[in-house]
Amino acid sequence: LNQDPDSETHSELTALLTAAKNGDEKAHAELQARFSDRLQFGTAGLRGPLQAGSMGMNRVLVAQAAGGLADYLKDYDKQPSIVIGYAGRKNSDVFERDTAEIMAGAGVQAYLLTRKFHPPVLAYENQSFDSTAGVMVNARLNPPADHGYNVFLGKGTGGGQIGSSSVIDYV
């Protein structure tokens, strides 16, 4: 809760905590479900419901993923760079900006796409900039309540999406 910079998910989590503290078993079960584990990198990245907690897509989880990815990129490339794009789901632009700020703070050159794009455009731009990686914040092929954080590798890898083992130790 103290890490969460987003007023909406902060309020959501505060309400759940208050309800659970007051004996609401449903709220207690919801908290357990949201914090029982954390989203894991799977095919191409992270996917989950837009919600507070380590089992949801939110600004805290995106910041942690971006920090881990930045560490991975710095180990992989002496001059790491990343292209970051977003699609039209809620908070996509916020997750893009948060990722860019964390990358820049970690010493990774960040290039932001200036408007909404589809993932294939990001893969193309990743190759065009010859960047170390790319992140596409989207979930267009997933249920409406879900969000995604797709990672593409660059520089000599052909711009393909990561597999679950590529960065798992960093995030």
Image (tube, grey):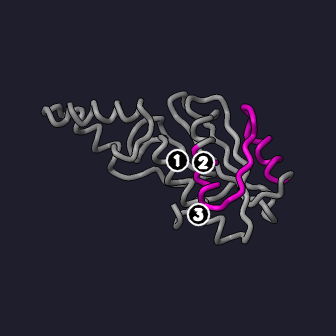
Residue 62 in the image: above or below residue 106: above
Residue 12 in the image: above or below residue 96: above
Q: Residue 150 location in percent, x, y?
A: 64, 47
In the drawing, what numbered circle is on residue 99?
2
Label 1 or label 3, whichever comes before in sequence order: 1
For residue 125: magenta?
yes
User: Total number of numbered labels?
Assistant: 3
Classify mark 1: residues with Cα within 10 Å, few (<14), some (14-19) or many (20+): many
Magenta region, residue range: 98-127
The residue most toward the right is: 128
Label 3 or label 2, whichever comes before in sequence order: 2
Q: CA distance from mark 2 to mark 1?
A: 7 Å
Q: Which residue is mark 1?
A: 62
For residue 131: magenta?
no
Label 2 or label 1, whichever comes before in sequence order: 1
Query: Please, what secondary structure does the residue beneath circle 1 have?
Result: helix
Residue 167 left/right relative to 118: left
Residue at image coords 33%, 43%: 1
Q: Residue 53 location in percent, x, y?
A: 38, 43
